[in-house]
Image (tube, rainbow, N blue to C red):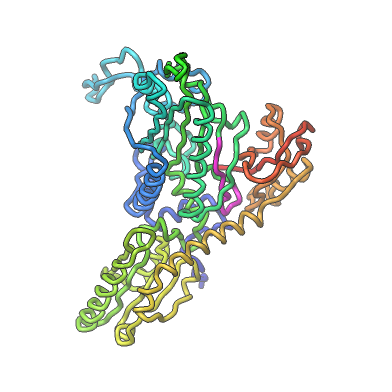
Amino acid sequence: MAKAPQNAISPTRADDYPEWYQQVIKAADLAEVSPVRGCMVIKPWGWSIWENMQSVLDGMFKETGHENAYFPLFIPMSYLEKEAEHVEGFAKECAVVTHHRLEPGPNGGLVPAGKLDEPLIVRPTSETIIGAMYAKWVQSYRDLPILINQWANVVRWELRTRMFLRTAEFLWQEGHTAHATAEEAIAETRQMLEVYADFAENYMAMPVIKGEKTSWERFPGATMTLSIEAMMQDRKALQAGTSHFLGQNFSKAQEIKFQSQEGTEEYAWTTSWGVSTRLVGGLIMTHSDDDGLICPPRLAPKHIVLLPIYRTDEERATVLAYVDQLSAELKGVQYHGAPVRVLVDDRDIRGGEKTWQHIKKGVPLRAEIGPRDVAGGSVFLARRDQSPKEKQGVPKDQLVATITTLLDEIQTNLFERAKKLRDDNSRTIDKLEDLIAYFTPQNEERPEIHGGFAYCHCADDKAVEEELKKLKLTVRCIPVEGDDEPGPCIFTGQPTQRRAVIAKAY
């Protein structure tokens, strides 16, 4: 007889990481491929994670003085053409609307009709359309700063897609601000990077490196791009958020001008910054295991699932009364400013199947409750950050009193586990041959999980970019924290002041 699988997810991370990722999404019922090529349907459990992310981030934005607004989905092509570097960076990914109606075709189908005078671009990002509005709103230094964010969908016509990580349509927020001075705009750019890092580490339990992008990795049209970079369990990097200082590039293209206090006419200094549903993919790949999703408690759709167990109608009535009371008590507890999120699962399916569904969906705590537990005033408790076999009896009152502590223990454990993985797979490398060896798998035909983060001296030079492309590597960022450490570039020998992080990346 064939051995029963040891894990709920097949293949495992070690066997086939990309397919494991897809199977975790399926098993956790997060999303599925849509009939529209390159797009996805986000299902309720996945949407709840994104909603929780939105809620936290929205509060953080508003605490830093930003307001929400909304701008059009369609952007006139002439707007993109005004900023040459910007349009060049996005041209290949743009979806274009050329007609405004359909008419019956000769073979019974529909054909586009009513050609537009000017093609419209389906929003790939909104700097140009928002800049056009800021040009109308800004007349004087008294009108500045403008601090606006929008929650929206964008379209970038990706050829190779992967759910949450890279899809033709995705959801995000994009902040756009305008300032009277470069110093104010740079401070805004750095502030928002800190907001993203705070969110990633304290809510997603995902350790990140804050850094500046090289010239060839900058956002098209930006003067400076900052990012947060995280290591996934396959040791590849994920860019999890970006904040851009746009200088006066977009202001000059969009005519965002104001009269200064001295009476001179000046161009505004602008920024943009954003994160997307890619964060859900990052959460999956940072924490999940070969049994499915593991969700950090601060973002989990539900904190605890109560699983009633009974055989007879009499037992059912007794157990459910106990479960309902416990549910009410738990919902009366505050966890980071909101009630504990409780799910009571009394569906008529086998107990083992039900339990494994919640394991695969990553619910932080599971409590089984049968007649014996009711009689003893207890529950049989399990944590998602531990083995499915690890369960223990806990008095009901103790569970209510300590649930916030338990959830925070799980949150902290997930962060420390992810940080250890990153630290264990980061190397300081000074020779090109060592860099090549670090990122070369032992099995070229079926590469095992290998590499990680390499800290190297790396010049901001086009020649370096070309050499990295040959190795299928990227400079993720030049970390903004830590001391300067001068040294020669491992590719060109040019002097550099700080080490950069080099990795394979999503």
Q: Residue furthest front?
A: 262
- Whether residue 96 appears in this view of the structure is no
Residue visible at 51% across and 32% down? 244
Q: Residue at x 62, y 39 (%)?
A: 477
Image spot of residue 136 (x, y percent): 35, 19
Foreground residue among 112 and 29: 29
For residue 369, what is the image quadrant? bottom left
Residue 101 falls in image quadrant: top left
Q: Nearer the viewer, residue 237 or 20?
A: 237
Magenta segment includes 232: yes
Q: Is residue 488 magenta?
A: no
Question: Residue 387, can we see it?
Answer: yes
Q: Where is residue 176 in the image (x, y as percent from the top left)?
A: 42, 31
Q: Is residue 73 left or right of residue 278?
A: left
Q: What stretch is highlighted in magenta?
A: 226-236
Q: Residue at x 30, y 75 (%)?
A: 308
Residue at horizontal 44 percent and vertical 69 percent from the top: 406
Q: Nearer the viewer, residue 312 or 88?
A: 88
